[in-house]
Amino acid sequence: MTAKQNLIVIGNGMVGHKFLELMVSKGGTQHYNLITFCEEPRVAYDRVNLSSYFSGKSAADLSLVEPGFYQENGIQIHIGDKAVAINREKQTISSSNGLEIPYDKVVLATGSYPFVPPIKGNDAPGTFVYRTIEDLEKISAYAKHCKVGVVVGGGLLGLECANALKAMGLQTHVVEFAPRLMPVQIDEAGGIMLRNKIEDLGVKVHTSKSTTEIVSEDGKIIKMLFGDGSEF
């Protein structure tokens, strides 16, 4: 009987988990030892509906993994352990926790990462990215002591974030560099309709705005500066 090969999936997001589900459904466990690295402290969850976390859904509600799925199918999952190096000569994967596991095949399913514009002050206390449940927990905790929230970026995820800030009771602004919201997805007419809809929800929209600086004082953000000389 031929020994099973090691197939390592780097990343346990929506795509990485879907791949493992398909491997199981197609009988892949007969030929491969399935191993996956998950940088986050929890298994795959629904990142598309992340903002529902603010409306009462728990991390368990958002989970994409059926209880016992990995254990029942013999899948090794390394939670909270990031794959940091692929040694192609030795054919091994090294992790942040010091593991070194040999592989026969590797699937890269690392997903994306949030782009942080090179704005002065973008690392000030009170600035966050919006991608993981941990990000949302940090935003939620910080927002308890705030009155105003600003989202830099008027794409789909930015608008999701704005909706979350509004739901937390913050006076909410969206700042977009382009002349309309969601400029990649919709045209000018659609942009006008979307802006009206968003502003009807109580969110202030600022388009054609280039953020140049986030100004802090005594560890708190006090204002934002823009390329046209305006501020708020």
Image: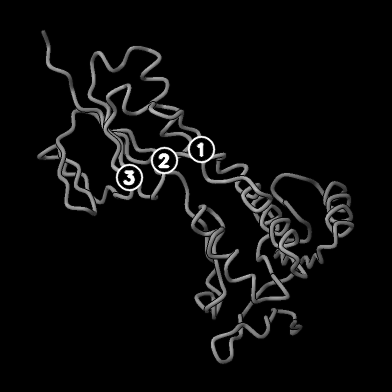
Q: Residue at x 56, y 72 (%)?
A: 127
Badge 1: how crowded within 10 Å, few (<14), some, or many (20+)? some
x, y percentage for residue 167? 74, 58
Q: Amino acid at mark 1?
A: Ser
Q: Nearer the viewer, residue 34 or 187?
A: 34
Q: Nearer the viewer, residue 123 or 30?
A: 30
x, y percentage for residue 53? 61, 49
Residue 16 versus residue 55 in the image, above or below: above
x, y percentage for residue 35? 27, 32
Q: Nearer the viewer, residue 143 or 123?
A: 143
x, y percentage for residue 141? 57, 67
Image quarter in which the N terminus is found = top left
Question: Label 3, on which residue?
Answer: 79
Question: CA–CA distance between discs 2 and 3?
Answer: 7 Å
Query: In what element is the residue under mark 3?
Result: strand
Q: Amino acid at mark 2?
A: Val
Question: Label 2, on which residue?
Answer: 43
Residue 122 versus residue 9 in the image, above or below: below
Question: Label 1, on which residue?
Answer: 63
Q: Nearer the viewer, residue 140 or 156?
A: 140
Looking at the image, do the residues carrying marks 1 and 3 touch, with CB atoms under 8 Å apart?
Answer: no
Q: Residue at x 64, y 52 (%)?
A: 157
In this figure, which colouring scheme has been used for the structure?
Answer: one colour
Q: Residue at x 60, y 47 (%)?
A: 50
Badge 3: how crowded within 10 Å, few (<14), some, or many (20+)? some
Question: CA–CA distance between discs 1 and 3?
Answer: 14 Å
Farthest residue to the top: give it.
1
- Specify whether 199 is left or right of 120: right
Q: Which quarter of the figure has residue 232?
A: bottom right
Looking at the image, do the residues carrying marks 2 and 3 touch, with CB atoms under 8 Å apart?
Answer: yes
Looking at the image, do the residues carrying marks 2 and 1 touch, with CB atoms under 8 Å apart?
Answer: yes
Farthest residue to the bottom: give it.
218
